[in-house]
Image (cartoon, rainbow, N blue to C red):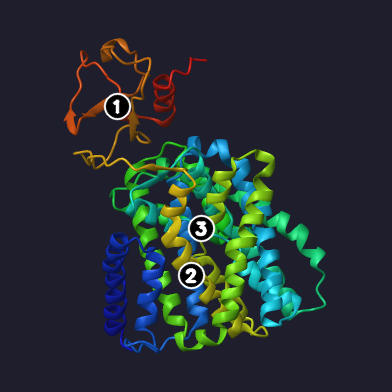
Amino acid sequence: MSGTALLLISSALLLLGVVASRLSSSLGIPGLLVFLAVGMLAGSDGPGGIEFDNAEVSQTLGVIALALILFSGGISTSWTEIRPVVRQGAALATVGVFITASIAGLTAAWAFDLSLETGLLIGAIISSTDAAAVFAVLRSRNVSLRNDLRPLLELESGSNDPMAVFLTIGFLELVTNPASDPLDFVPLFVAQMAIGALAGIGGGRLAVWALNRIHLDHDGLYPVMSLALAGCIFAATTSVQGSGFLAVYVAGIVMAQRRFIHKNSLTRFHDGIAWVAQIGMFVVLGLLVFPSELASVAWRSLVVAAVLILVARPVAVFLTLMPFRVPWRERALISWVGLRGAAPIILATFPLLEAAPDANLIFDTVFFIVLTSVAIQGTTIPLVARWLQVSAPMEKRAAWPIRPRSLQPPGASLQELVVGPGSPITDQPLVELGLPVGTMIVLIERDDEFTVPTGSTVLVDGDRLLILGDDASIQRFRERLAGVPDH
């Protein structure tokens, strides 16, 4: 295939994925399902007829895409929001994943009459979640989540992939090398997580330092630099036997809490890159599967999927969150939002490359389980959220009518704050509020109308403020809005 033909096909599939995502939003169907369908239709078993069965290329592209998606998720995460749920999220991402993998793995071994090691390998592969598709469904149905549910789900989905990768590699070693001792993997896991976390913290700080200290002549080079830094953090951590996925996610979170040049534009850039990675990865994985082979594993995969959805995930969530006294309604929703995504399909390519026993069976089974999870859970999340009374209507707000090219000083950001009912700053002119040094209210939206404030402007309940400043100063003003006394 010529380079021109490859570019044409790749661009056409990417464009088709983008257009299909618009349709999925209208119908309330998770984008993941649509992207996979595009790949399957374009593949050798579909009308597209594209011959593609290179598991190594798929795995490489998938790993890179997943790293970029995790970095984007981290850099857009607010530490203020996830700080109250860090312990719960960490527990779900480790203990919860292990419990899910164990129950699902035992079921897979029984349903397919496989060895215990092979069954647990399948359980490990399908143990991580993908909440990105969940939030796409919630946005399309105008549903929001109450309390700390959203940040908890974001934190769990962004941090549970490293545990799933570790378990997959560990059980794959047991399958291909039965003489291996499972206890040997415990210190390896601790080392990988520790190295990944430390590398992420150090890498994130180093990235902020580099972006602020290395002055480039062209603004367009900063996205290139930040992309290269993310790649270096992932690759360097992996090369020293650390968890590269955990490192890039933590690095993104660290960067999100610090000031660096072009922060807003770089965050939007990585969000766009994450979308490209997500669509490309799903389409390629859809190309890799042969739909005609899925029928042979359908009913047994349905058994595993049913246990995963109705037993393994709920048991893992309820047991893991029991010490944190999370209300049962919220635990029930978290259980149902255990949506499988791209990570399991990527991990399913590992046995293919290692030529493990039953590797094709494992890949087809995992693919079918992912499709089942997305089709059933992904389309019913808004209904379940309303039934459990943990949803809240998503407010439709007018877009701010400004899009600045850059902000000064470096590290400043534009953030949105809402004046809540009973806020102590209402009914006072802005000149008397004593805004933190370095902050400025740029615009006020009231009743769908925008106003440029002056010193005499008086705030009222429900005002939406666009405020310019650094994170620390804006956080102080946010606390004043909520009536938190100064320390």
Q: Are marks 1 and 2 in contact (CB under 8 Å)?
A: no
Image spot of residue 279 (x, y percent): 37, 67
Quarter location, residue 21? bottom left
Say which label, 1 or 2, has the lower sequence index.
2
Q: Is residue 85 above or below residue 487?
A: below
Q: Residues within 10 Å of mark 1 (few under 14, many from 20)?
A: some
Residue type (three-letter) at the residue carrying disc 3? Cys
Of the two numbered discs 1 and 2 in the rendering, the one whose residue sits closer to the viewer: 1
Quarter location, residue 19? bottom left
Closer to us: 317 or 240: 317
Q: Tell me the residue that label 1 is attached to.
A: 462
Residue for point 55% across, 87% down: 296
Tag of residue 124: none
Q: Tell me the residue that label 2 is attached to.
A: 62
Q: Under tag 3, what secondary structure?
A: helix
Closer to us: 45 or 440: 45
Residue type (three-letter) at the residue carrying disc 1? Gly
Q: Is residue 335 above or below residue 32?
A: above
Q: Under tag 1, what secondary structure?
A: loop
Name the residue at the top extreme: 432
Q: Residues within 10 Å of mark 2 (few under 14, many from 20)?
A: many
Image spot of residue 313 (x, y percent): 61, 58
